Amino acid sequence: TVAALDELLSLYPAEHAARSLRAEVLAGMGKGDAALADYVSLLEQHPGHAATLRQAAGLLVQSGRTEQALAWVEAALEKSPADDELWLLRLDLSGRVGEDAKPLLDRWQQASPGSAFCQDLLAGFHNTLGDAAQAEAHADRALEKNPLLFRSGVIKIQAELQRDPAQA
């Protein structure tokens, strides 16, 4: 499989899908450094490609290089501050290093105030803390932009049931 992908890449060196697939195959074979080299090549061509960055960051974390993964994601966020996928990746990494999620969610909201996903996560965060009023306010903002967000929809239903238990 790697040989076939190598041959394909010799013919089409800029083929994103083939290089990405080769990186996945190499990573699956335990060849993390070779896989990471392919991901680096892809990120040089497409610096903010969140899926590629997620794969590369995962390899970096596996090899104990979490700080490097954080630096890469932060650099991508500087270039694309409204990219929800990058923020989700950054949030995932924050959990791996034991950072508090709230300051990161606040940064996301400031960088991308129109993000329904950020509002949805803030709704869930405040709901977990038992702050129903804040949870509902963020759920309202999230659902205004994307009415299909499950978590915010549940929070709204909970709030309505608390106001009128007879609806249950």
Image: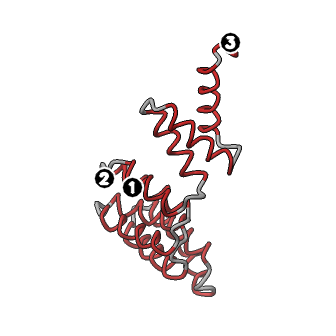
Q: Earlier in the sequence, mark 1 or mark 3?
A: 1
Which label was assigned to residue 166? 3
Q: Position of residue 167 (x, y in %)?
A: 70, 16
How far apart are the alpha carbons under marks 2 and 1?
A: 6 Å
Quarter of the figure that contains the C terminus: top right
Instruction: Tell which of 35 and 145 is nearer to you.
Output: 145
User: What's under tag 1, amino acid-wise?
Assistant: Leu
Q: Residues within 10 Å of mark 2 (few under 14, many from 20)?
A: few
Find residue 97 and name its label: 2
- Amino acid at circle 2: Val
Q: How many marks?
A: 3
Count residues near mark 1 (Cα–Cα under 10 Å), then give few for <14, some for 14-19, many for 20+: many
Residue shown at the point (43%, 54%) measured from the top left: 106
Q: In the image, what residue type sits under mark 3? A: Ala
Would you call the spot at circle 3 few (<14 residues within 10 Å), some (14-19), or many (20 or more)?
few
Residue closer to the observer: 85 or 135: 135
Q: Which residue is mark 1?
A: 93
